[in-house]
Image (tube, grey):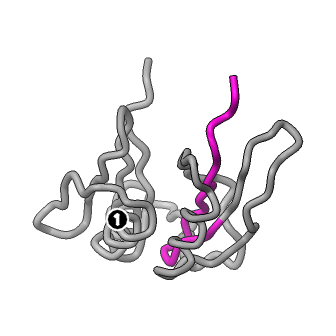
Amino acid sequence: MKLGYTIVYVPDVSASLTFFEQAFGLQRKFLHDSGTYGELDTGATTLSFAAHALGDMNFPGGHVHADASPQPLGFEVAFVTDNVPAAHAQALKVGATELAAPQVKPWGQTVSYVRCPDGVLVELCSPIAG
């Protein structure tokens, strides 16, 4: 078994793709003609976005809309970077909300947290020295 992709349900797939491109420098891999599903190239695992309408079709009982939740969901997307402060600043510049400024953790890793306009919680972190 291997992780194939992560799908985040969002209100506007194209807007989420654009935000992640501008904030984190990711490349768009695919956007369906319907605009309800798209993917970003993040390396071995694809980060995908799907419209809330698709979530409503898949989950008859409904699902939590991260963008409408007053608190971030108990789930994050983490991006590893050599320059957390610069990545953090860029995300804020294009519309993210700061949840935690970059700080060095006791194990030596620099970590920050932002919340994207679509509600997604993102951790920006330096590589763990190993």
Q: Which residues are magenta?
A: 114-130
Q: Residue at x 53, y 49 (%)?
A: 79
Q: Find out whether residue 128 is within the magenta segment.
A: yes
Q: Residues within 10 Å of mark 1 (few under 14, many from 20)?
A: some
Residue farthest right in this picture: 106
Secondary structure beneath dot 1 equals helix
From what the image shows, is residue 99 above or below residue 78?
Answer: below
**Magenta segment includes 25:** no
Name the foreground residue: 101 vs 118: 101
Q: Position of residue 50 (x, y in %)?
A: 34, 61
Q: Is 115 displayed left or right of 90 in the figure?
A: right
Q: From the viewer's perspective, is residue 107 above or below residue 18?
A: above
For the N terminus, the image quarter is top left
Q: Residue at x 51, y 81 (%)?
A: 93
Q: Position of residue 122 (x, y in %)?
A: 59, 59
Amino acid bearing label 1? Glu
- Can you name the residue that lies furthest to the left here? 33
Give the side of residue 19 with respect to residue 87, left or right: left
The residue singled out by tag 1 in the image is 21
Residue nearest the viewer, comparing 104 with 31: 104
**Residue at position x 43%, y 45% in the image:** 6
